[in-house]
Amino acid sequence: MKLLITGATGYIGRRLVAAAVKRGYQVVVSGRKRPSDMDIEWVHFDLANPQAVELPDGLDAVLHLAVVTSSSAELEDREVVAGQSLLDATARAGVPVLFVSSQTARSDAPTAYGRNKWKIEQSVLAQSGWVVRPGQVYGGSEAGLFGVLVNVVRRLPILPAFVPAPRVQPVHVDDLVLALLSCLERRPQSGIFQIAEPDPITFTTFLSAIAHGRIRRKRGFVPVPVVLVKAAIAVLGAERSRRIGLDRLLSLFALPSMQTAADLDRLGITPRPLASGMTYSGSARRRWLIEEGRAMLTYILREEPTGELIRRYVRVVESLRTVGALDLPSWALRCPSLLALLEGGASLQDDLREELAWRFNAAVTLAESNPQGARRFLWLGERRQGGLVKALYVCRAIASEVLARVGKLLVIPMIVGLKGKRGERE
Amino acid sequence: MNQDFDVVLVGSGPAGVSAAFPLLEAGLRVLMVDGGKTPPVPAPSGQFLDLRLRQRDQFDWIVGSDFHALRHDGAISPKFRTPTQAYVFEDYARANRIEAESFIAVGSLARGGLSNAWGCGVAKLSADELSDFPFPHQALDASYEAVALRIGVSGAVQDDLSSELGLDQYAQPPVALDPLQSSLLARYEMHRQASVAAGFRMGRARSAVLTQAKDGRQACDLSGSCMWGCSRRSLYSATEDLLLLQRYANFSYFPGFVVDRVLRDSECMVVQGDDGTGKQSWRARRVLLAAGTIASTRLALMATDNISSVGMQSCPTAAFMVWVPRVWGRSRSPAFGLGQLAYTLYVGDGRHKGYGALFDTTGIPMAEFSKFMPLGKRFGVDVLSSLLSSCAVGNLFLPGRLTKATLSLRNDSLHVTGQYDDEVPNLIADAAKQLRSEFRRLGAWVLPRSFTIGRPGSDIHYAASFPMRHRPEPGQTDPWGEVCGVQGLHIVDGASLSNLPAKPHTLTIMANADRIGRRLAADLVAERA
């Protein structure tokens, strides 16, 4: 398939180009300048100075992602004109168009941005193209609106919690890219496709997911009434609030909720969980395994394992086992001594009992084979030697074992045990 | 018809190299082929305890950068989890088309064969144990001597096993015992009359380990890495002999050549195989199979047209842990990692003689023990780290005729099955009972629940699938290892032993190979003249 992609150097565009190339598609990018960091065919196209567009031959589809991000109203209007000239060219060539629009697209949107998107959508639909309206795009590199939000969360220790809380529907950039390519491959009937998590979450939840999952810091929230923000915008005036980006908040406050389940289904997309998508790799599998490895190894070693050892545990599970991290209860991850209550695993599902036993064994093997383990296992180094110390050690171990067995009988039935595998949806 | 060689030897393990020496001495042109695998990870060098305490990348030889030890988590012996020795066992069954069912079938494509990973136990068989062999027991004496002197054995000391193991006149002094085992031996010497009367004898193991330097190999310094490979080359491996063989101008060595088939073609033997790039064949006056008992059996069965299935012996085996309370709390010290003390005992009302050895626990990964602990892993490691320094691991072998294994040829693949005789569980229970009381006498305890029976074949002592007989029938060999019905094809490894006692059998395989080699050398020289 030969594709022309506008906005290829943007936040979504870069991931899209990479994914399309990976699938073996021939990609032509268009923009103001030849992208210096991509080795790819390029044609000139400038949203700000629209002119008749010359399309390359043999295209199978045009993906229009380009947006004007300037804060000048006059330029924003040109976006529609430019879009139209691109659409005219595709109509002449008979090439189908996929337009990446916005959740804010409405004829009466509070921002010109939303209204422009709506206008272009109409033209796309008029020539039987596809419109994709993504929700709150996040994940991957810190670019686009996502990049702005990550930076805000990184810089401010206290964040606003708008009241009433606006609701967003996140979608991971790679899931969106998958949806775009799937649309080109499946070629459904022309229409609008809304791609995002079906169940909206509050904007505050989204920001704290960034804090927790991406920058890994705790952030406080102070309530900020929406009316106050609106009043401030009114006082500042349209032009000034646009310049400092405040008007974007109006879009946020007025976000319509989207029914996405049917569209996700039509394109065969299952959005990944937010906690997974927020990590740098786009998947929390690693981090869960690291947590598991640290807990298991601490349990065996009776001290914090080295980072090298934890990495080894992760690599072992990733390369030898068919399941990723186990859904160990959080109390066991926080306090690895309590893993003794899970060993033997009478309360576990059958298929996981064996897996957990394998991992305990692997943790022993890994913990043993380095200087840290040799000190504990062979009783080497600066440790106090002698029969008495060792006898006390054995007594403690047996007492702890008895305690653990009693604990298993009394405690386990009352608390939630091992639930299953983590990240099964990936 | 022109031959490429006088003799082609299939396999470079202890049997192959032992047969080669007399042939080369006689000036015959000998080709040796083998699987050619060599160690990809070097054996650790230095004191084991130092390495464990200081070496950051010990993981590479303990577990392996590809997690070898964990990949082979289910394997029957720690030997198969050692990354430095993975190459020894790799691919043998596949390359030799061996399919085992209910039996552990092991062999080697390595240069030097299984001797790269052996326990180094050596012994001379007694006249009684050689009574099934179709020649007077003295016929092996010269060969025992030649082999023992060549490979270097140690353990010479006057004790209760001197006559049983019978190598003292050729042996270097024994390796030093660790404090635990020397305390056991001291106690044994105090009570020896009672023990011997009960049928239990203890003494030094005789081992193919140097305590004095020889041929560029260094003496054992108790570095304790035995299980991971000996960087000082104190432990014997047939690769040492291969180095000596390569000094002969009439010796050719072709590694990486896996033999598919051996057949008789008019006046000579043909060895067909694959060197990795394609099929190739060699012609010779004689072919000597030393590919390891199981692979040799397959090649012999393929060469005979009158039989497709033979039996095989293998020693039933067990392992246990002995705790010596009077050395409780001792610190780990450098120690020889293979059998230090050995014992024999009679089981089943004196009908069978068992043999075993005792091992220091330091060099064995603790994960091997913690699997069997009825405790949570953390507490298991707590207990073991305190307890193991006062424990030794013991093993037990019973005579090979107590295992009934069958090797059958099906479409050029060898199907291996086997199980212990019905009486083996009782014999092992009897042995366990006796060992418990014998070790009690020595102030030591066989730890409860530690006595475990190995699975059939896990001893890796396989023999007597083509036993030497005076008048061989199909599926047997003559006193010179020549396969009945295939003139010119000899078996010189374990497959042609007439019987497999419980004692270490490698030296006997080597001596027998040497004996056959001497005879063939004389025959071939005479033929040529």
Image (cartoon, coloured by chain):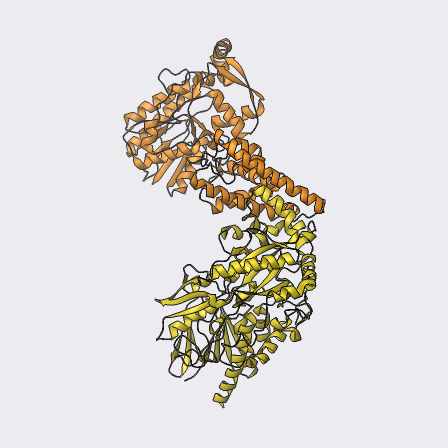
Going 39% across and 16% down the picture, which residue do you hit? A109
Going by the image, does B331 lie left or right of B228?
right
Q: Quadrant of residue B272?
A: bottom left
A233 relative to B502, above or below: above
B271 and B410: which is toward the camera: B410
Pick the quarter of the image with the N terminus of chain A. Answer: top left
Going by the image, does A104 lie left or right of B345?
left
A406 relative to B370, above or below: above
Pick the quarter of the image with the C terminus of chain A. Answer: top left
- Chain letter for the yellow part: B
Color of chain A here?
Answer: orange
Going 56% across and 48% down the picture, which residue do you hit? B370
Query: Is residue B248 something one can see in this rendering?
Result: no
B436 relative to A249, above or below: below
Query: Is residue B101 something one can see in this rendering?
Result: yes
A377 and B41: which is toward the camera: A377
Q: Quadrant of residue B151?
A: bottom right
Q: Position of residue B324 (x, y in %)?
A: 66, 54
Going 27% across and 30% down the picture, which residue do you hit? A189
A55 and B98: which is toward the camera: B98
